[in-house]
Image (tube, rainbow, N blue to C red):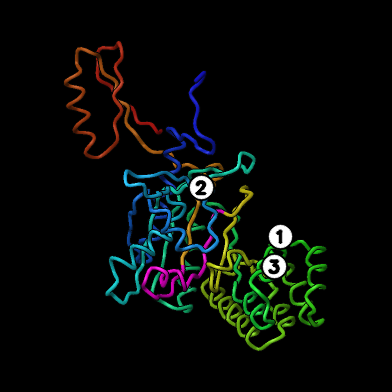
Amino acid sequence: MSQIRLPLGMRDLVFEEARKKRQLQERIETIFHSYGYQEVIAPTIEFLETYQKAFSSLKDQQMYKFFDAAGNTLALRMDMTVPIARICASKYKDEEGPFRFCYCANVFKVRESFAGKRSEVTDCGVELIGLDEQSDLEVISCALDTMKSFGIADYTLEIGNSSFFKKACILLNLSNDVAEKLAQLVDQKSMVDLKEYLVSLDLSQKQEEFFLKLPLLNGKNVLKDALTISFDDSLKAIVQKLQDLKENLKALGYEDNITFDLGKVPHLDYYTGILFEGYVHGVGTSVLSGGRYDHLLSIFGKDLPAVGFSIKLDYLLDVIDQKPEKILYLYYPVERQIEAFEKARELRKEQRVKLIPYNGENIMIQEGTQ
């Protein structure tokens, strides 16, 4: 090799960058622990089939894969939700729950060279397993408190519900292929293509209007419009639950930092209800994502509802402030090295100490930051 390089999508963090990331992780973990979540540490490597079992439409070309000595296909974990579902279903198979897990761990996904995202990032998140949708408020509150801990004034949590779209497709007896195509067009807000595709489906004017307006239902005050386009009482009931959630979040003081997006419909085979994404000023992609996934645990043999979220720490490093850390600089002449080391050892019981040899005669101590 003509030069020392890193693989595509990888990044070194040194000194100030590493310290900033560690400080951010500590802030986030403090919030998680304050909500009663307990840490889980899972292996970096899983069997590929574990992920294939969890995701019916898994794109395994996005995973880093290799083989063990027995010929089994292994993969670097691409998220922490699946390993936690595996852990819960195996280690706690005879317990009812609820379970509150939290984690901070590196996850890996192969990125295209032009994607602008990292192939290795640190995920910090929580999973609340064993409680129904009444617990959505707890997890969303935790997500908002976590975003507040970033120290960035301008942040927003966008909330949607995958059931709103999926229920409409069920009511209209649309096939999975049609539903997937509609979801793609709605999520991408491809209005011209969406309108043309809807014409081919032989829907009523009211039903077409539902899908056409769905991508536009994003903002603080869109739930009233969502009720208007709902062509069935079951759809209205979903909107009403979002309205109740909005009122509860308002009562808890979160109103200024939440919006709603009914056109948020990705991963139809995964999310089963509420879903949300967090954005901060200065970052061009979501830094937090989560939702309800009530069917995942049953795949591993333990049928429990679940909801959670994760934060991509690395996406935040360029926009958060670093807190300087106090340190003592102890200068010493080489001939007094042992004396200086003993002094430093005593001081380190209370503070950080950096030893610096110099050409003077005396041992000197200066306060500083790093």
Residue highlighted by disc 3: 218
Callout 1 amino acid: Gln
Quadrant of residue 127 in the image? bottom left
- Earlier in the chain: of badge 1 and badge 3, it is 1
Mark identifier at residue 94: none
* Image position of 309 with respect to 320: above or below: below
- Earlier in the chain: of badge 2 and badge 1, it is 2
Residue shown at 76% from the left, 61% from the top: 190
Residue highlighted by disc 2: 109
Callout 3 amino acid: Asn
Residue 72 colored in magenta in the image? no
Residue 303 colored in magenta in the image? yes
- Percent coordinates x, y for residue 66 in the rendering: 42, 43
Q: What is the CA distance from the residue labelled 2 to the residue labelled 1?
A: 22 Å
Q: Which residues are magenta?
A: 287-307
- Earlier in the chain: of badge 2 and badge 3, it is 2
Q: What is the CA distance from the residue labelled 2 to the residue labelled 3?
A: 29 Å
* Image position of 369 with respect to 286: above or below: above
Q: Is 349 placed left or right of 23 in the picture? A: left
Callout 2 amino acid: Lys
- Percent coordinates x, y for residue 162 in the rendering: 60, 72
Residue highlighted by disc 1: 188
Question: Secondary structure under badge 1?
Answer: helix
Nearer to us in this view, 199 or 159: 199
Quadrant of residue 354 in the image? top left
- Percent coordinates x, y for residue 242 in the rendering: 59, 77
Q: Residues within 10 Å of mark 2 (few under 14, many from 20)?
A: many
Q: Is 166 placed left or right of 323 in the picture? A: right
